[in-house]
Image (spheres, rainbow, N blue to C red):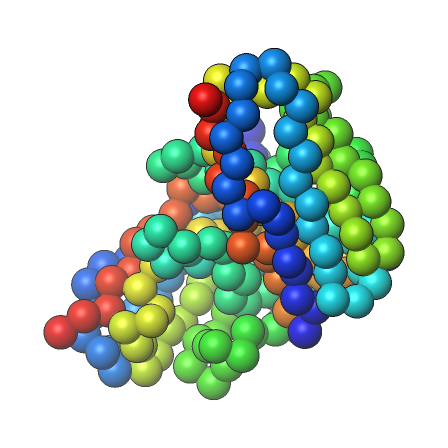
């Protein structure tokens, strides 16, 4: 069974940092692109960052997080990461890890989602 | 960026009704369009991609259509378990963008 399990969320002060992890199982991790998608309380879905398959040479960050968040992957550990720096109140959300159906984060939609981890940015 | 405009933002219908949700992209996205269902308190689930192909296990009362900039999700006979928020998504190019969602309720 394909599974994604996020961890690393929590309460952080504005300007602080967090590192989210997403442990994958049930598929050949390196063969697929992955993304982070977030959902603020009571709001819709926002794509945050994507990383291509393999060595993850190609990445993309939404304008709202560019320069503050960094997506990466460790294929030896079947784990996806999101390093979040300079956090703001508007980054408060549930963060989902999602697997794409192919090698790229575009031209391939997301077929499996984790249960999410909650990030709260507040003083 | 491709803007996705979904309508309506919410609807309420009777069990057995036909329900239609539309999604318009600000530019052509060549059917690189997915629909997701998010039940209350749950994780989004992929329903349809690209544009009209049902994901494995999705009931046949769901269907998708469209091309270019205009796409539609139809539930042919609404069931109580279909209560959810439905999102369309452009995955033609980055940044991937979602519609604002349509909340479907049963009267």
Quarter of the image with the C terminus of chain B in it: top left
Regarding residue A77, the answer to whether it shows in the image is: no
Relative to the observer, which residue lies in front, A118 or B32? B32
In the rendered image, residue A35, in percent from the top left (x then y), is placed at 56, 58
Q: Is residue A20 left or right of residue B64?
A: left
Quarter that holds the N terminus of chain B: bottom right
The residue under the point 78% across, 43% down is B51
Judge left or right: residue B91 versus residue A6. right
Give the answer, above or below, for where B75 lies relative to A59. Answer: above
Q: How many marks?
A: 0
Q: Residue A94: which quarter of the image? A: bottom left
Farthest left residue in view = A123
Which residue shows up at 61% across the image and 73% down it?
A: A60
- The location of residue B96, given as percent across then percent down, is 64, 63
State the image quarter where residue B86 is shown.
top right
Left or right: B71 as drawn, with respect to A25: right
Residue at 68% across, 34% down: B20
Where does residue A6 sit, x and y in percent of width and height? Answer: 39, 50
Question: Up-down: is B61 above or below A30?
Answer: above
A79 left or right of B47?
Answer: left
Residue extending furthest toward the bottom: A67
**x, y (%) of residue B104?**
51, 34
Of A60 and B76, nearer the camera is B76
Q: Residue at x 55, y 73 (%)?
A: A62
Quadrant of res B24: bottom right
Q: Is residue B89 visible?
A: yes
């Amino acid at each position: 069974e394909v599974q994604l399990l996020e961890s690393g969320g929590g309460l952080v002060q504005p300007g602080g940092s967090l590192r989210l992890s997403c442990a994958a199982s049930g598929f050949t991790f390196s063969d697929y692109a992955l993304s982070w998608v977030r959902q603020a309380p009571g709001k819709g879905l926002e794509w945050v960052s994507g990383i291509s398959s393999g060595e993850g040479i190609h990445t993309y960050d939404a304008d709202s997080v560019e320069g503050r968040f960094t997506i990466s992957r460790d294929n030896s550990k079947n784990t996806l990461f999101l390093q979040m720096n300079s956090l703001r109140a508007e980054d408060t959300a549930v963060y989902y890890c999602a697997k794409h159906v192919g090698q790229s984060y575009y031209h391939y939609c997301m077929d499996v989602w984790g249960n999410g981890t909650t990030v709260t940015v507040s003083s | 960026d491709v803007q996705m405009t979904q309508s309506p933002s919410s609807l309420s219908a009777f069990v057995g009704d036909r329900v239609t949700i539309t999604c318009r992209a600000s530019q052509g996205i060549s059917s690189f369009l997915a629909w997701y269902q998010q039940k209350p308190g749950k994780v989004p689930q992929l329903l349809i991609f690209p544009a009209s192909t049902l994901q494995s296990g999705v009931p046949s009362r769901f269907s998708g259509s469209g091309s270019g900039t205009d796409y539609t999700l139809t539930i042919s006979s609404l069931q109580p378990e279909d209560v959810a928020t439905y999102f369309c998504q452009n995955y033609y190019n980055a940044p991937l963008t979602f519609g604002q969602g349509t909340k479907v309720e049963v009267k």
